[in-house]
Image: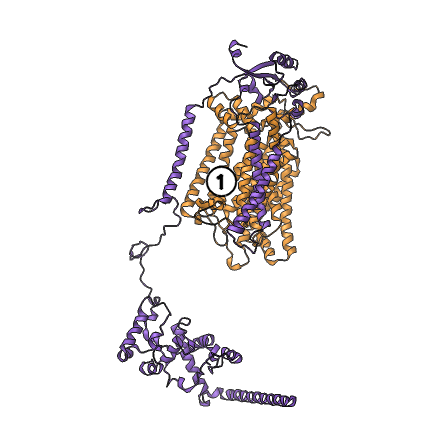
Chain colours: A purple, B orange
Amino acid sequence: MSDDKNEKKIHGIVAEYTSVDTLLAACRRVRDAGYTKTDAYTPFAVHGIDKALGIKPTVLPWLALAGGLTGTCTALTMQIWMNGLNYPYIISGKPFVLSLPAFIPVAFELTILFASFCTFFGMWALNGLPRFSNPIFTDPRFDRVTDDRFFLYIDSKDKSFDAKGVEKLLGETGTEYINSVVDDDSPTTIPKFLIVGLCVLIGLSIIPALIVAKMRVTTSSQPRFHIFPDMDFSPARDAQQTTTLFADNRAMRPDVPGTVARGQMDADLNFLTGIDMDKFAQVDSDRAEQLVRTYLTPLAAEGEEPTAGAAASNEKSVMETTPWLEQNPLEISDAVVRQGQQQFNIYCSVCHGMDGRGNGLVNQRAQKIMAATWVPPSSLHQDVLYADQYPDGKLFNTISNGIRKMPGYAGQIKAKDRWAIVTYVRALQKSQNASMDLVPASEKSKVEKQKNQVDKALAEAAEAERKKEEERAAKAAAQK
Amino acid sequence: MSLAIPNGLDNTVERPGERAPLVLGDTTYHDITETVCRVAETKPSKGWVIGFLIAFALLQWLGICIAYLFYTGVGVWGNRSPIFWGWPIVNFVFWVGIGHAGTLISAILFLFRQEWRTSINRAAEAMTIFAVACAGTFPGIHVGRAWLAFWLAPYPSLNLWMWPQFRSPLLWDVFAVSTYGTVSLLFWYMGMVPDLATFRDRSKNKYRRMAYGILSLGWTGSSRHWIRYEKAYALLAAFAAPLVLSVHTIVSFDFAVSQVPGWHTTIFPPYFVAGAIFSGFAMVLTLMVPARSMLGLEKLITIRHLDNMCKIILATGSIVGLAYGTEFFIAWYGQVPDEQYAFINRAFGPYWWAYWTMITCNVISPQLFWVKKFRTTPWIIVLITIFVNIGMWFERFVIVVTSLSRDYLPSAWAYFSPTWVDWSMLIGSFGLFFTLFLLFCKLMPVINMAETKSTLAKQYHMAHNEPTTPTEH
């Protein structure tokens, strides 16, 4: 050993061995000699060395247990709070707070994760690592500890440490190499380039975060810089742009012949109001203008037709002064009648009855419970409602805007369907006054047969009813 | 075909009353150090450089495809109604499955004190990490707006004002796969620290010494450290063992908790786990057999190691075959017409080719391992394990695609065709995997030197009474 070495502080003495067995024997010997601040250095974990050196068991398993339990609690608290309390959200009828089966997978994963972190970092912390500078690295032969050599070290802090004695003791344990471990004289400062490099790296890594932070709080008249297009750009063309897709280079396409624009049909005011608007303008220009304004203002929502114009003022005078359309503007056909029947059965029959006699289910029910506010629906077969007294346009207007207790149906039934209902009502009215002459000859006998059957059935029913009534009366009398 | 046994030693022969040696030849501690360190210390071979360039090119191609996907949208994939879970999810399940063998070898075989694992566990764990990286890519880019994938994390977002839904198996997946990746990484790195210290102590170059010095955290090999280290290793193994079973179980929940016929089955968790181990071991062998001869590790990774892994493949392959049979049995026994149709359609419907590829590769090919000659002949092992990998990819394809393409409503039936982007991403993911694996081979200790030395020490210890003592060099 050189003089130079003597100036340095001696941390301990190390001895080298070539096999596990000599090392273990040496360890036992050193332990029995009463040294406690000892350590063995080996290229791999040597089993039994804890006993040979007298090393106590580690607390690591307890750390792992604590970590695992923390993980379970964290996961359950997190899930219950997030999905049960802070943002309750029902999924497949599972309970909000204690959806335990659904919460198990994440709880399990976090248990393992936290326990693993505690084990991993706990182990390094207990070992005092990372520690890059260690006096024992100064030993010239110590590099082989990670290859194939075994070292035994006795620290100078040990109570019974005495350099000569230790060297003598180690000399008897089958070693060929004994050396004192001295201070590490390698430079202790971190190389400058590492520090500079690290600073530059940290500085650069802050920049993107700063840019994002700035962008979040500033407004700009410029379009956003798109890293990801996020479906913000559509390949669709604007109205006046050109395209090579079509021969005429127009991106805006002309209507296909026969196209009906949305709302185009609604522009026919006669059709919409059931009033001959030209005549109406001559008779009562004020109200006509009001109607036109209401219907043709874009603000008037589709189907929302005014009651103001036709129905608001005195009914009698309106009846007289309004030039109602006498003719249904629809071209009457089987299809229109059927359409009208369908719509009538859906919307009207509940009150007016399937046959239009005013005894629909709603009316029956109202009679039964004797609703005080109930105004019975009109029978459509009263004389005043026939075409000669009640023009088609007026009937249309009644369906659209309502009358007395009946609400307007303009919001529910399209104008065309309302006209179809008018057609059907006329057909219903006709059906009540049909004579046998109207029935085709081939059908006559069949219809007569049916008529007789119906008459007979009606008569029988009336008779049965009368008898029942009599019996009831007799019973009541008898009870008295 | 002769058995390629180095030094003419055959450790596949069973000698009653004797343990087969795990390390062959007159190997000493120092020989192990030399063999393993040489791989990282010598200049890369031509084969390595060519392999790396190919893998790296494929990785670049994957990157370009991902950029194209981000810019254009997920429409570049073949995923169409009703097969919204197409190719990317197939790749995800495939890669997660590959990862399992690594943890299984390092954790479960460790807990069962299977010492033959020591020379293969490092590479297998590395494979796990890289496979999980490949797997994580796919659900990451499958969420549509991938740059918002962090919304899956439960963090107090001021933009959303809401939390992720913990009752969804897709969120369980996020936790399962990320926990699995993290714990595997810790386990892998921790296992490497003593070997990195060996690298540090052997390095002549200043920068190399500094880099490995930082990575090895100042490891000295102190016994007090070793004791805590071993305890930590055992604990991590104990945590990783149930974790590895849970990961694929949770992946299988993605399917099993849905109502799709062919998915809604309770057999999925065990069946997926068995399949994962099966495919993982196949991948380990596919990698290790060439690596062992190219890196000159025949003495450490012996034929017996390969033989043992082949036996595991045989066992898990049979489990997988049984699971296929059970699925059919339950479909018939359960008397649900849609379920029955789903399985008949798998075998004889428009995807019959995928189904029978799967059966051939997964059920029939591993049965060849009953023959000892096949288990001990490296090139046959590689051939069969490549078949197993292909078969396991097809298994995931069959499960995902056939089930979705034939749902309850015939009006919603469709046929899946992958696009060139789908193909590129599958191939590109292999680029990512092999790039990382080749870098690992070159920069890290491919074999756990410390543990292999400790098994060798045991061998010496047991051979005490015999004339042969460890040779000093």
Q: Residue at x 36, y 82 (%)?
A: A391
Determine crowd level at label 1: few under 14, some 14-19, many 20+ residues with C-alpha closer than 10 A: many
Q: In this view, does A64 lie above or below A382?
A: above
Q: In which quarter of the image is the N terminus of chain A?
A: top right
Q: Name the secondary structure under disc 1.
A: helix
Question: Label 1, on which residue?
Answer: B429
Q: Quadrant of the C terminus of chain A?
A: bottom right
Q: In this view, does A112 lie above or below A230?
A: above
Q: Where is residue A142 in the image (x, y as percent from the top left)?
A: 56, 19
Q: Position of residue B252 (x, y in %)?
A: 57, 47
Write down the quadrant of residue A95 in the picture: bottom right
Towards the viewer: A227 or B390? A227
Q: Position of residue A305 (x, y in %)?
A: 36, 72
What amino acid type should be assigned to the residue bearing mark 1? Ser
Outermost residue to the right: B17
Towards the viewer: B14 or A295? A295
Which chain letter goes with mark 1?
A: B
Q: Residue at x 48, y 54 (%)?
A: B81
Q: Where is residue B354 in the image (x, y as percent from the top left)?
A: 55, 48
| Number of numbered discs on residues | 1
Q: In this view, does B107 lie above or below B327?
A: above
Outermost residue to the front: A480
Instruction: Confirm whether residue B130 shows in the render.
Output: yes
Towards the viewer: B467 or A112? A112
- In the image: residue B56, left or right of residue A294: right
- In the image: residue A185, left or right of residue A272: right
Towards the viewer: A174 or B2? A174
Instruction: Confirm whether residue B247 shows in the render.
Output: no
